[in-house]
Amino acid sequence: MAAIILVWNPGLWNAWNYDAVTDQVAETGQFLDRWSVGRHRNIQPGTQAWLLLQGQGQHGRGLIGHGMVMSETYEAQESSDPGSTVRCVNVAFDALLPLGDQIPASVLASQAPGVVWNRVRGSGRAIPTGLEPELQRLWREHGPAASDPSQTVPGTYPDEAVSRVEVNRYERSPEARRICLAFHGTSCAACGFSFEVTYGDIGKDFIQVHHVVPVSQLGSGYRLDPVSDLVPLCANCHAMAHHGVGTPRTVAELRRAIAAAGHLSGQVVDGRALAAQDAAHRILEQR
């Protein structure tokens, strides 16, 4: 099963503080929650999940979120009836639209036919395989603006990097990223992958920067060390650092996992690497 529909009707189930949930997704990249899937049994981890807003309220029906199933189906106690159970999966929501900005059911009906969007009842229904590209296209056009994965979300570096609004917002810091990459280089710290080696000039200086400790766990007085708190990871290793865990896996854990699977390659230190290391020392001495 490649993708499923999850249904949310705030009028019938309103356990979410939706504004807080969308804030958490924006700040940390995901919100993990349990979701009932009715009679459906064969949902597997890695299945895409599309969140469909329902109900007759002021906001109207429409596609409002996306996530990834993180568990197999399991039985859980029904909160409204302690004597009964319900079949559930764990879902990591990674993108949510504000209420009122959902992709309307009328747009879904005209551009993603194959599902009667106004009549979807219950969660866990599979989406026809041929319909997935259309949903992804609609989400690219109408969904949240994509963030630049090459930018980090650091702690408080420099002092002005935290602004107090509803919660602490950690701004992106090009300076912290520059120092991190000057010290660690632009190859993945876990698997050694280099975008420049693989893609040539278009991959030069491109790599995601991973915050070792989730910013949601840091206090407002925290001062970031770009060398010890940030590390370059390729997209695959970055995803695996967060996959299925509350606290990200360390680089050492990722390397052990790769080695156990038989895919960890050795690293060759060449002249450019040594020159980069010398440049890093010069940069750090100027701080």
Image (cartoon, rainbow, N blue to C red):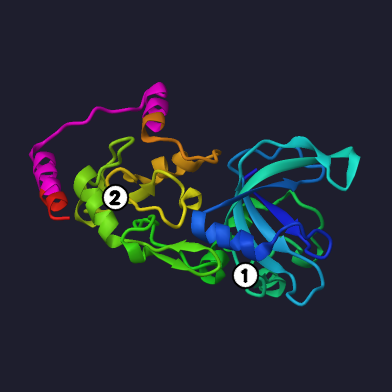
The vertical placement of 287 against 271, above or below, is: below
Q: Residues within 10 Å of mark 1 (few under 14, many from 20)?
A: some
Q: Position of residue 137 (x, y in %)?
A: 54, 64
Q: Is residue 198 left or right of residue 27?
A: left
From where the camera sits, is residue 199 visible?
Answer: no
Q: Nearer the viewer, residue 223 or 200?
A: 223
From where the camera sits, is residue 262 visible?
Answer: yes
The vertical placement of 188 against 28, above or below, is: above
Q: Is residue 184 left or right of residue 61?
A: left
- Span of residues in magenta: 254-281
Residue for badge 2: 226
Residue 98 numbered tag: 1
Name the residue located 53 percent from the left edge and 67 percent from the top edge: 144
Magenta segment's dominant SS is helix
Q: Nearer the viewer, residue 208 or 79?
A: 79
Q: Position of residue 145 (x, y in %)?
A: 48, 68
Name the residue located 44 percent from the left edge and 68 percent from the top edge: 163
Q: Position of residue 197 (x, y in %)?
A: 21, 44
